[in-house]
Image: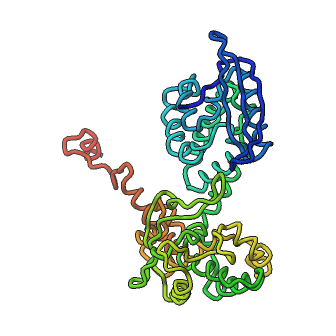
């Protein structure tokens, strides 16, 4: 049976009881008097620390004083937003409703919907917005999605569930512009050749604690498969097919509120990636030493932990190494740019390259083509656009035989 919530605006009495026989030994409790019946119900929660118990009591007191029921305050954002959607969207023009609702359904709920309303902080929103930008969606899409989140969280402020609106973030436009600039010329971010990759991988290993060779394997594998670091971290034994030397890329390891999680790939696009001869020995060697469990990770850190781009950076002193090698622009994600650039230069057909990359848009894949080849394609596109435009008659107009102007010219 669910616990009762205090009626709006009642006075609460509180206490914290220590019960050492329980795994969560601190019981925080609030009690109140029902105005109509004079009954004295209560509500309680168990916590591992006294500070956590006190924080819960303080929140209950704050909500009761504002006339907000605790049940509302603890709703996940998805449920709270659905319950106040009409209020949040009031005053908007009809043409704005569809993009706002799409932002709520396609981006806000999958990213933040599981969090309680009070757990949505400025930092959480910052990371969510950065993730939307990284998904290569349009600027207006990010703007509409953020505006929708601002409206829902503003209603939470009005309801007294939170004190300030955490969705009023700034600076995302600069992040978006930087992402656009990088995508305009991703080839400029790539390593020039295999020797440069080999030199980088060896240097990172030398700078890591204990000179852990796994970092070199991660870097070589990421570049030669054009994969993101999170996708490299997510690869399991069963994903590698040695008979065809291919990788069934279907998951990634990524950060989320509460820690690292494994989830589907970006855009939920499952793809098959070739494993080229240059890294087959590397992959075979790792398969030989990891567990026989089909879900065993192919790549882990020195303590068998999951890998992230931040872990790779810190463990190898990445920023210092790339500066020393003259690749000061290079980030971990540029290993993916490297692989896609090399494949494009090797003549991999555009539609195949798009499948390997997992791009949603063909335009994104085209940016990896060599400038000379791209210039030829653009010339063809320009001609096609010209021919498909309004057609104009070529040469002088043909004058009908019985036209008065024809007779005038003949007289002259």
Image location of residue 210, percent across then percent down = 76, 84
Residue located farthest toward the left when viewing the structure as drawn: 402
Please identify the quarter of the rendering in which residue 59 is found: top right
Answer with left or right where residue 6 lies relative to residue 386. right
Q: Quadrant of residue 297?
A: bottom right
Q: Where 402 sits versus 321, above or below?
A: above
Q: What residue appears at the point 71 percent right and 24 percent down from the top-left corner? A: 31
Q: Nearer the viewer, residue 307 or 173?
A: 307
- Return the residue nearer the eye: 384 or 155: 155
Q: Is residue 190 visible?
A: yes
The residue closer to the viewer here, 190 or 145, is 145
- Residue 136: x, y in percent? 56, 55
- In which quarter of the view is residue 271 placed? bottom left
Q: Could you tell me which residue is drawn at 69 percent across and 47 percent down?
A: 22
View extreme (top): residue: 36
Indicate the colouring scheme: rainbow
Q: Position of residue 87 (x, y in %)?
A: 57, 24
Residue 104 placement (x, y as % from top left)? 54, 39
| Front-lying residue, 74 or 379 | 74
Query: Is residue 36 shown above or below 233?
Result: above
Residue 140 visible in this rendered orientation of the protein: no
Q: Is residue 335 left or right of residue 357?
A: right
Residue pushed farthest front?
Answer: 21
Q: Residue at x 49, y 76 (%)?
A: 293
Residue for point 51% across, 87% down: 284
40 on left or right of 248:
right
Q: How many marks?
A: 0
**Above or below: residue 313 compared with residue 131:** below
């Amino acid at each position: 049976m669910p616990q009762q919530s205090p009626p709006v605006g009642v006075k609460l009495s509180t206490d914290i009881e220590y019960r050492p026989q329980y795994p969560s030994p601190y019981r925080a409790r609030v009690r109140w008097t029902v105005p109509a019946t004079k009954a004295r119900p209560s509500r309680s929660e168990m916590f591992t620390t006294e500070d956590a118990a006190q924080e819960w009591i303080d929140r209950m007191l704050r909500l009761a004083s504002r006339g907000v029921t605790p049940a509302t305050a603890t709703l996940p954002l998805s449920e709270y937003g659905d319950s106040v959607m009409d209020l949040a969207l009031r005053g908007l023009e009809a043409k704005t409703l569809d993009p706002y609702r799409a932002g709520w359904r396609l981006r806000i709920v999958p990213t933040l919907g599981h969090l309680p309303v009070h757990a949505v902080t400025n930092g959480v929103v910052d990371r969510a917005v950065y993730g939307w930008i990284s998904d290569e969606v349009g600027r207006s899409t990010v703007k509409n999605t953020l505006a929708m989140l601002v409206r829902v969280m503003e209603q939470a402020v009005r309801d007294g569930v939170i004190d300030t609106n955490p969705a009023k973030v700034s600076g995302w436009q600069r992040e978006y512009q930087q992402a656009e600039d990088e995508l305009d010329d991703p080839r400029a971010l790539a390593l020039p050749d295999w020797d440069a990759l080999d030199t980088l991988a060896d240097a990172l290993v030398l700078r890591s604690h204990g000179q852990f060779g796994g970092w070199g394997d991660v870097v070589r594998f990421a570049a030669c498969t054009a994969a993101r670091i999170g996708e490299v971290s997510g690869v399991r034994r069963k994903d590698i097919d040695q008979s065809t030397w291919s990788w069934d890329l279907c998951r990634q390891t990524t950060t989320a509120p509460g820690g690292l999680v494994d989830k589907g790939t970006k855009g939920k696009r499952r793809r098959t990636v070739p494993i080229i001869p240059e890294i087959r020995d590397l992959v075979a060697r790792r398969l030989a030493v990891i567990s026989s469990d089909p879900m065993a990770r192919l790549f882990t850190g020195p303590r068998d932990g999951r890998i992230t781009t931040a872990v790779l950076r810190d463990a190898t002193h990445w920023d210092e190494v790339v500066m020393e090698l003259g690749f000061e622009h290079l980030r971990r994600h540029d290993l993916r740019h490297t692989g896609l650039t090399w494949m494009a230069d090797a003549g991999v057909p555009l539609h195949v390259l798009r499948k390997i990359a997992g791009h949603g848009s063909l335009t994104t894949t085209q940016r990896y083509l060599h400038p000379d080849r791209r210039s030829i394609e653009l010339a063809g596109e320009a001609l096609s656009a010209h021919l498909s435009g309004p057609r104009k008659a070529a040469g002088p107009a043909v004058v009908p035989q019985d036209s008065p102007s024809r007779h005038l010219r003949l007289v002259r």
